[in-house]
Image (spheres, grey):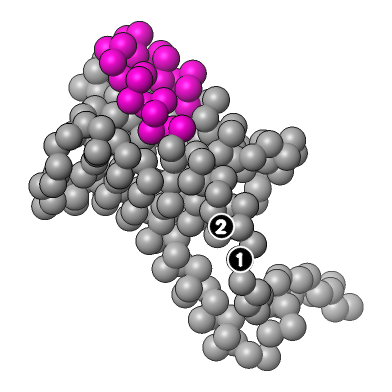
Amino acid sequence: MKIQLIPGRYRHHRHLFYRRLGRKVSLITAGAVLQGFAMAVFLFPHSIPSGGGAGIAVLLNHGFGLPMSLGFWVANFAFLIFTAHHLGIFSAIGTIYVITATSVSVNFFEVYVRPPLLNVWLDLLIGSLILGTGVAMLMRQRVSNGGIGYTALVIYKYKKIKPGTSLFWMNGVIFILAAYVVNWRIILFAIGCQMISTRVINYILGRKPQRRWTADFAWRSKK
């Protein structure tokens, strides 16, 4: 028996398939860069963790002196290991790419972009809006902003709980721990960031995207 991977009814139009693939990769990259920009320019200057992965990175930095970008990558990758088999190898690979691209973006923007405002409330608002937009772009492509976001997709798949809602509660637990260990001020800004960004996520994911051609994958068996 021979197994053949076929890109849906467009198997005879490879250029359309690769155009779709290129668009998907571009949107994933844009979402990762957007959230990295929000973290580095608006949130991290005030030590505001943008999510559970960033909260764990703060704890690792505080306890072991691990750089924030490396701590962010390690924390998210650890969550990904335990949930990857629920959504498949392609989503897992995409999430690993997002984690890496976000970490690189954070380092780049911290070095080359000077925070424009340095007002904690304005930065919190703008950073949360940009962060939520980036995360929603990633989830639209069936990848997440990190291991915890990947876990939110698994919960949505089996329990039908909106990803933004489950993200809020999982991240909230991590924020409380980080606030207890580091500084109680963290939790106020972190929860504010989550309240704004998760509402942006739910709003964008709740909108119906315009219909475009899709390259569905099917398995065809030949004897």
The residue drawn where x is 30% and y is 44% is 126
Quadrant of res 179: top left
Q: Is residue 81 visible?
A: no
Horizontal and vertical percent position of residue 221: 84, 74
Q: Which kind of residue does numbered mark 1 sit on?
A: Pro
Horizontal and vertical percent position of residue 193: 38, 33
The residue drawn where x is 78% and y is 70% is 219
Residue range highlighted in magenta? 171-195
Q: Which kind of residue does numbered mark 2 sit on?
A: Arg
* In the rendered image, the vertical position of residue 185 relative to residue 18, given as above or below: above
Q: Is residue 135 visible?
A: yes
The residue carrying mark 2 is: 140
Q: Earlier in the sequence, mark 2 or mark 1?
A: 2
The residue carrying mark 1 is: 209
Dot 2 lies on which element? helix
For the residues labelled 2 and 1, the Cα–Cα distance comes to 9 Å
Which-is-in-front pick, marks 2 and 1?
1
**In the image, which disc is placed on residue 101?**
none
Q: Are marks 2 and 1 in contact (CB under 8 Å)?
A: yes
* In the rendered image, the vertical position of residue 184 relative to residue 80, given as above or below: above
* Quadrant into which the C terminus falls: bottom right
Dot 1 lies on which element? loop
Magenta segment includes 191: yes
